[in-house]
């Protein structure tokens, strides 16, 4: 497959409060919009029901189920903003070193998908807080399993997040991830 060009985004320092636009962009692009609930685990017993842009808690604060009423895209945007604010708070709370906006965007997307609890216990967080940032892409790659099995979609997502972390813009990161990663053995150079 042809490689798309690498575009490096600005190197602004994150203010620890703002949700970087690229974080929201990558989550929307990867999750996609679903007006009706769907089982994100592929209808396996005990699956995770989601709606909108991958949210698991509805506007009333209840877990999304197969019986959750459909929502509009505007309602999904509101839920996404709420959940992204939570992921942003988790990252700001747990990361104790300054971050570039691109680094924050990648970590917020990662945390949106995996949760603040997983961020807190990750070796990736230890690497960031001890200023071993070059280890972060490899640490992100470790988080590709669902129910103990590696998934191609999660590998692509982790590669896109790792690419964003090092400064590749979110659109090109996602395009490259889906164009260049065809098997679980793929991890293209940045």
Image (cartoon, rainbow, N blue to C red):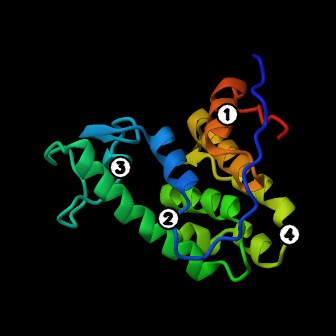
- Regarding mark 3 in the picture, which secondary structure is present there? loop
**Quadrant housing the N terminus:** top right
Disc 3 versus disc 2: distance between alpha carbons?
A: 14 Å
Give the labeled residue for mark 4: 132
In space, the residues marked 1 and 2 are separated at their CA atoms by 22 Å
The residue beneath circle 3 is 48
Q: Position of residue 26 (x, y in %)?
A: 54, 46
Residue 113's mark? none
Q: Are marks 2 and 4 in contact (CB under 8 Å)?
A: no
Label located before the other in sequence (1 or 3): 3
Q: Is residue 187 above or below residue 124?
A: above
Report the Cα–Cα distance between label 1 and label 3: 24 Å
Q: Earlier in the sequence, mark 4 or mark 3?
A: 3
Q: Secondary structure at mark 4?
A: loop
Q: Which mark is residue 115?
A: 2
Image coordinates of residue 146 in percent, x first then y, are 53, 46
């Amino acid at each position: 497959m042809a490689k798309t060009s690498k575009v490096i985004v600005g190197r602004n320092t994150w203010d620890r409060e703002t949700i970087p636009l690229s974080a929201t962009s990558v989550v929307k692009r990867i999750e996609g919009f679903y007006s009706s609930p769907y089982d994100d685990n592929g209808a396996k017993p005990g699956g995770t029901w989601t709606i909108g842009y991958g949210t698991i808690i509805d506007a009333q604060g209840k877990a999304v189920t197969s019986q959750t009423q459909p929502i509009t895209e505007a309602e999904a945007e509101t839920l996404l903003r709420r959940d992204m604010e939570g992921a942003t708070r988790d990252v700001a709370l747990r990361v104790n070193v300054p971050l570039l906006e691109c680094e924050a965007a990648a970590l917020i997307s990662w945390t949106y998908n995996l949760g603040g609890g997983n961020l807190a216990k990750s070796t990736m967080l230890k690497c960031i807080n001890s200023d071993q940032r070059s280890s972060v892409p490899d640490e992100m790659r470790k988080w590709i399993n669902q129910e103990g099995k590696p998934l191609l979609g999660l590998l692509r997502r982790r590669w896109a997040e790792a690419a964003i972390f090092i400064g590749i813009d979110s659109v090109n990161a996602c395009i490259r991830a889906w164009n260049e990663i065809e098997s679980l053995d793929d991890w293209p150079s940045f």
